[in-house]
Amino acid sequence: MNTFSSWLQQLRQWLRTLTAICLLFLLTTWTLPAQAASNIDRKLEQQVLEIIRKNPQIVVESIQIYQQQQQQKIQTNRERFLQDLKANPQAVIGNSPTTGSPTPKILVIEFSDFECPYCGEAQKTLDSLMAKYGDKVQLVYKNFPLSSIHKQAIPAATAALAAHKQGLFWEYDGALFNNQDDLGETLYLDIAQKLNLDLEKFNRDRTIVEKEVARDTELATNLGLSGTPFFIIQSEKASGAVQLSELQKILEDMK
């Protein structure tokens, strides 16, 4: 849901709350028939809306305040996330798929969507970077399926995490990105068969890991992510969100 729609919902809720408070006050003074109370409710809401129409700056100011509050909340969430990542990286990583060094100098967390074409392109660069610097870098994969525009994003994510349960996430990951135009049930089962996965366990785990995808998505939302791919880096010299080009330069400078 976008910011403006969310604000409108809050405004409507505020109107309902204000109406309810006024009605409660009136009802404590005298008892009215249900129809009369309903008329007062509509009249009061109309009065509030009329005030807004005559004072449109109230709406603009309210939107600005709301946006500032949201940005502050996101900034606080990001700072807390980076603190947690530095203090206890394993707690942040959790059960997410990882590749590279188990004792890295640089930790990179990637938020990605298997149906996102930009993620597919980024994966090629990441594969190259990990081939060069995998002894110094650990890459962590977090799911951020943009399900509103990518209908196969969540099914693909659950399939990949189900493969992770059998130790073959990165092989499955590569197969998905190499076949983005064919995402669907036929492809998911075909990749699983080619990787010799236990199909019964694979199908069972696809349902189980839905909660993990949801947790990753909630984390991405709390961090204010609006698109994919998105990278967060943690090292002695750098900390925070970076573009893939910046990440590439950081790793090259590390030599």
Image: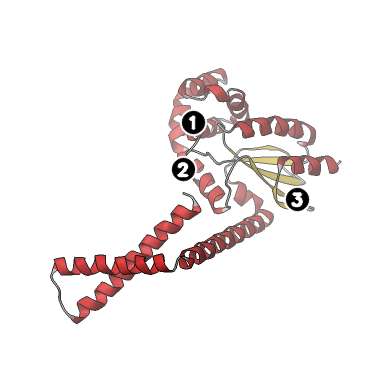
160 or 181: nearer the eye? 181
Sort mark 2 into few (<14), some (14-19) or many (20+) by Cα contacts within 10 Å: few
Identify the amino acid type marked 2: Lys
Mark nearer the viewer, 3 or 1:
1
The residue that label 3 is drawn on is: 235
Please tell me which residue is depicted at 69% across the width and 44% down the height of the picture: 108
The residue that label 1 is drawn on is: 152
Q: Secondary structure at mark 2?
A: helix
Please tell me which residue is depicted at 56% across the width and 33% down the height of the picture: 164
Identify the amino acid type marked 1: Gln
Distance in Å between CA atoms under marks 2 and 3: 29 Å
Mark 3 or mark 1: whose residue is earlier in sequence: 1
Q: Secondary structure at mark 3?
A: loop
Q: Secondary structure at mark 1?
A: loop
Q: Position of residue 196 (x, y in %)?
A: 55, 20
Q: Residue furthest right?
A: 255
2 or 109: nearer the eye? 2
On screen, residue 172 versus residue 252, left or right, reads: left
Residue 9, quarter of picture: bottom left
The residue that label 2 is drawn on is: 211
**Where 162 sits versus 198, above or below?**
below
Distance in Å between CA atoms under marks 1 and 2: 17 Å
On screen, residue 67 versus residue 207, left or right, reads: right
